[in-house]
Amino acid sequence: MIIDLRYYPSQDFVDFIFKYILPNSTIKVAQYTYPLLTLPGVFVVGNQTYRVSDNDKYNAPIVVLVNEGNQSAAETSVQVIQCNPNTQTIGSQSAGANGNISEFILPRGILGAFSGLGWYYPDGWVVNRQGVKIDHEIRPTLEGIRDGRDEMLEAALRLIEEKTEEE
């Protein structure tokens, strides 16, 4: 199965996929931190978990495609899918822009926004600014673009083929 999350996916699609590829248990997907505004310099740590009910599970190889268009909740979706041990993630660095949005108003009514959360993998890997973990870095080449090829998709198909032959 190839899941293309290079841009922002439909949440309905992602929730549907989760049911079939994740273990029948509560899984810890991520950790996050946020400042305790009443005590400057103090941060609270929380956990993002996901609970899956009993379903027939998809046990074949999964490849997730990501690039700089993958951001925010889409990055969390990648983290959830990566909880399946048969998952490989390929592509280029995601946006690294996960977490809630905190807005503020500048002079002249200009609206600004930033993430008010630090976002991490359970092992401490920082998603903010770095993006999601990638197993195989693949970037489009000028030649591939000229030829109208999708080199990430081609690499995903090769990876699925290799994994299928191993089984």
Image (cartoon, rainbow, N blue to C red):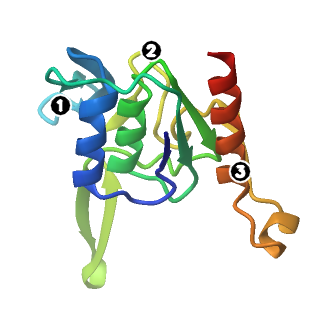
Disc sitting over residue 111 in the figure: none
Residue at image mark 1:
36
Disc sitting over residue 154 in the figure: 3
Query: Which quadrant holds the C terminus?
Result: top right
Going by the numbered disc 1, the residue's amino acid type is: Leu
Q: Nearer the viewer, residue 31 or 161?
A: 161
Mark 2 and mark 3 residues within 8 Å of each other at the beta carbon: no
Whether residue 145 sits left or right of residue 16 in the image: it is right
* 2 or 3: tag closer to the N-terminus: 2
Whether residue 18 sits left or right of residue 4 in the image: it is left
User: What percent of the width, then of the height, locates residue 83?
Assistant: 39, 22
Residue at image mark 2:
123
Between label 2 and label 3, give the one nearer the viewer.
Answer: 3
Disc 2 crowd, CA 10 A, few/some/many (<14, 14-19, 20+): few
- Residue at coordinates 25% horizontally, 48% vertically from top-left? 100
Q: Can I make out residue 116 in this image? A: no
Separation of marks 2 and 3 at Cα, in angstroms: 31 Å
Separation of marks 1 and 3 at Cα, in angstroms: 46 Å
